[in-house]
Image: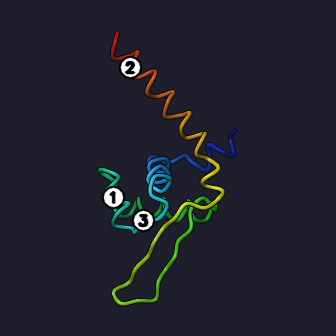
Amino acid sequence: MFYTISLISGQWKVGILAALLENETLRYSEIKKRINNITERILIKQLKELQEDGLIIRKDYSEVPPRVEYSISEKGKSLEKVLLTLHDWGKKHREKQQAS
């Protein structure tokens, strides 16, 4: 369990993974648009960590202007059920809290 948490810990990693699970491949700017209030520095850091952990794949095209795309890896895709379970848990408990 601690290994899994260490891979997805970080304020924005789950959001990045969710965006890539929904879209398969996104450019940096598209990820930034989908995640509100994330700074450039933090997004770059979180993307690097996710790539180093093998959860996402970074593809750098040798073009001008530069183009970089991120996609979810097979290892990252295998987290989908875990992330959906976390989402469902949060939704259930948020609704209970709002009802009280």
**For this rendering, which residue is in front, 15 or 43?**
15
Percent position of residue 83, x then y: 55, 41
Q: Amino acid at mark 2?
A: Glu
Which residue in the structure is indicated by mark 1?
39
Q: Amino acid at mark 3?
A: Leu
Whether residue 93 sits left or right of residue 56 in the image: it is left
Whether residue 71 sits left or right of residue 4 in the image: it is left
Q: Amino acid at mark 1?
A: Thr
Question: Separation of disc 2 and disc 1 at Cα?
Answer: 29 Å
Q: Of label 3 and label 1, which has the lower sequence position? A: 3
Circle 3 — which element?
strand
Question: Separation of disc 3 and disc 1 at Cα?
Answer: 17 Å
Which residue in the structure is indicated by mark 3?
26
Residue at image position (68%, 41%) is: 2
Whether residue 16 sits left or right of residue 33 in the image: it is right
Circle 1 — which element?
loop
Q: Of label 3 and label 2, which has the lower sequence position? A: 3
Q: Are marks 2 and 1 in contact (CB under 8 Å)?
A: no
Residue at image position (41%, 89%) is: 63
Which residue in the structure is indicated by mark 2?
95
